[in-house]
C-alpha cells in the first residue's frame, strides 16, 4: 500500500485516483481552494481529504500531478517548496522542455508521465506512459488496474514526448478541421465542401459536425496543450505552426467552457468572431 | 467546337486536354521552352502544337491555365500581354486573393477554376469547380467528359476558395502526419507511437507509411500550394500557421522530386536534416 497525493481530482485525476484506491492505495487530495465539483468527484472516488498542501505532503510517498498543462510547473514548484522528499510524477500534457524544468527540481525523484485516452472508467482505453529512473514505482501502483502502463526507456522525458506526438494528431486535426469549416463559411463554399467531404475521407463532414460538441467544453484547456506541442516541435527544429494555429482556434472557443454540446455551426461563429478580438 | 489553348500539358493539364479533344474541341499547346516529357504527354493527348504563345493566342477563344501555383500570375500576365481578348480560365491551386489579381487583369473574361481529385483518366473522381460570370462557357466545354464540373455562385473567386478548403485538409494532414513521425523519431518514441497509431485512427501508422511514397515526388509543388492556403486563411483572419508549417515540411522534401517511391522513414531524414539548412 502506497500513500499518494493527487493534485488535483479533475475528471481525469479523480478517475486515476479511483483506480489507485481500488488497488488498495490511500489517495489524498487537498481541498483548499478547490471547487464543490472537485470535492464531489473526490468523494465519489473515495479519496482522502486534507486541508492544505503542507499537511498533505507529510502523509505521502508519492505526489501525482494531473492538472491543465499551464499549471504543471506551478504545482511542481509548490510541492517542492514544502520540502517534500518523495517521488514526484507529472502526468500532464507538457512539452519535454517543460518537463525538463521539473526534472531539474526533483532529479532522480522525478517521474515523467503522459496519459493517452479518456479517464480510465473501463479497461483498455487509457494508457499511462512513464519515463525516468523511478518510473517502475508509478507503474507498480497501477498494476492490475484499468490503466495500462508502459515505461519508455529512451530518455527521462520520453513519456511527455509520446503524449505530445499523440495529441498532436488528434487535437491538431480537430482544430484544423474546425478551421477549414470556418474558412469555407467565410468564403461561401460550405455547401460545396459538404458535398466533397460527405463522399470522401470517411465522411469527414459528419466528423466535423461532431467536433463542435466534442471540443467546445474542453477548448480552454486544449489551447495551452497546443502551445506545449508547438514548443515540442520547436525543440526538435520542426515547424511549430500547426499547433500555434490550433492554439489560436481553441483560444477563440475558450468562452464555450460552460456550455453543453455546442453545434459546429455555432463554434464557427466564435472562430470567425475571434477575428475582431 | 471551341479552340482552347492549354498552358501547360503536365500530368493534370494533358489529361484535361485529352478530355476536351475527345469532346470535339481543338486544344493547342505551346512547345517553346517545354520539356520532351511535356511534348510526349501533349502528343499522347492529341493536342495541337504551336511554336509560341503569341502565335497560339490568335488561334483560340479560350485559354486554360493549369500550372504550379507559383507560376499562375506569370502565365496570366504573359497571355494578357499578347493582347488576347478571349476567356481566360485559371484552374490552379491559388488563393482567392491571388486569383483576384487575374480577375483584375481580365475582368468579366476571367473564369476562376479549381480542380479536386486526380488527372481525369476515369469517370467520377475529378471535379472542376468554376466561378465567375463566364463560368458556364468552361462548364460547357467539359459536358459529358470524365471531368465533373460545377459552377459555384457565391462570388467570382469561389472556385479557388473551394480548392483551398479541400487541399487544406488532404495535403495539410499529410504534412502534419509526416511532421509528427519526424517528431517521434527525434524524441525516440517512434515504437510507442507505432503501437498507438496501429490500433487507433483507422491504422494511422499504415497511412503514415504510405505518405512518404505518396508525397515525396510532388512535395516541391505542394509547398507553394500550402503557402496559397496559408494566404487564404490569412485573408479570412483565421490562423495561417497550419499551412505555413505544411509548406515548411514539403519544402524540406523538395529535393525528392525525381525519386520514385521514397519510404516514409527516409522522408523523415530529410525533414530532420532540413533543420540544418
Image (tube, coloured by chain):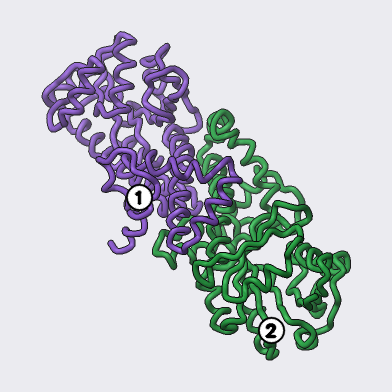
Chain colours: A green, B purple
Callout 1: helix, strand or loop? helix
Residue lying furthest bottom: A83
**In the image, residue B151 above or below residue A272:** above
Do marks 2 and 1 share a subunit? no
Q: Quadrant of the C terminus of chain A?
A: bottom right
- Specify the subunit that label 1 lies on: B
Q: Which residue occupies 37% across, 48% down?
A: B227
Q: Is residue B128 left or right of residue B74?
A: right
The foreground one among B240 and B108 is B240
Percent x, y for residue B236?
49, 48
Q: Is residue B214 left or right of residue B1?
A: right
Percent x, y for residue A12?
73, 62
Disc number for residue A86: 2
The foreground one among B186 and A184 is B186
Q: Which residue occupies 44% across, 27% down?
A: B129
Q: Residues within 10 Å of mark 2 (few under 14, many from 20)?
A: some
Disc number for residue B266: 1
Percent x, y for residue B17?
29, 20
Q: Is residue A86 left or right of residue B220?
A: right
Callout 2: helix, strand or loop? loop
Q: Which residue occupies 43% across, 56% down?
A: B182
Measure the C-alpha gap from mark 2 to mark 1: 44 Å
Mark 2 touches mark 1? (CB < 8 Å) = no
The foreground one among B87 and A114 is A114
Q: Which residue occupies 63% across, 83% down?
A: A77
Q: Residues within 10 Å of mark 1 (few under 14, many from 20)?
A: few
Asked if residue B101 shows in the view, the reply is no
Asked if residue A123 shows in the view, the reply is yes
- Specify the subunit that label 2 lies on: A
Amino acid at each position: 500500500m502506497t500513500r499518494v497525493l493527487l493534485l488535483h481530482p479533475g475528471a481525469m485525476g479523480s478517475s486515476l485516483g479511483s483506480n489507485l484506491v481500488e488497488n488498495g492505495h490511500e489517495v489524498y487530495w487537498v481541498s483548499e481552494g478547490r471547487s464543490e465539483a472537485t470535492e464531489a468527484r473526490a468523494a465519489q472516488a473515495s479519496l482522502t481529504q486534507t486541508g492544505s498542501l503542507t499537511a498533505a505532503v507529510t502523509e505521502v510517498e508519492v505526489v501525482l500531478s494531473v492538472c491543465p498543462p499551464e499549471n504543471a510547473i506551478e504545482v511542481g514548484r509548490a510541492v517542492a517548496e514544502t520540502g517534500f522528499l518523495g517521488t514526484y510524477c507529472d502526468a500532464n500534457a507538457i512539452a519535454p522542455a517543460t518537463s525538463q524544468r521539473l526534472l531539474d527540481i526533483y532529479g532522480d525523484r522525478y517521474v515523467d508521465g503522459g496519459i493517452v485516452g479518456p479517464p480510465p472508467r473501463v479497461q483498455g482505453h487509457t494508457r499511462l506512459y512513464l519515463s525516468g529512473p523511478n518510473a517502475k514505482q508509478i507503474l507498480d501502483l497501477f498494476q492490475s488496474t484499468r490503466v495500462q502502463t508502459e515505461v519508455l526507456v529512451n530518455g527521462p522525458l520520453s513519456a511527455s514526448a509520446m503524449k505530445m506526438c499523440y495529441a498532436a494528431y488528434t487535437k491538431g486535426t480537430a482544430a484544423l478541421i474546425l478551421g477549414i469549416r470556418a474558412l469555407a463559411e467565410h468564403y461561401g463554399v460550405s455547401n460545396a465542401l459538404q458535398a466533397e467531404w460527405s463522399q470522401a475521407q470517411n465522411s469527414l463532414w459528419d466528423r466535423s459536425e461532431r467536433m463542435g460538441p466534442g471540443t467546445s467544453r474542453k477548448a480552454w484547456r486544449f489551447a495551452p496543450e497546443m502551445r506545449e506541442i508547438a514548443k515540442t516541435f520547436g525543440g526538435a527544429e520542426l515547424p511549430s505552426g500547426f499547433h500555434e494555429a490550433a492554439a489560436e482556434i481553441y483560444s477563440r472557443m475558450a468562452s464555450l467552457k460552460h456550455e453543453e454540446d455546442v453545434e459546429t455551426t455555432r463554434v464557427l461563429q466564435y472562430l470567425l468572431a475571434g477575428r475582431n478580438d
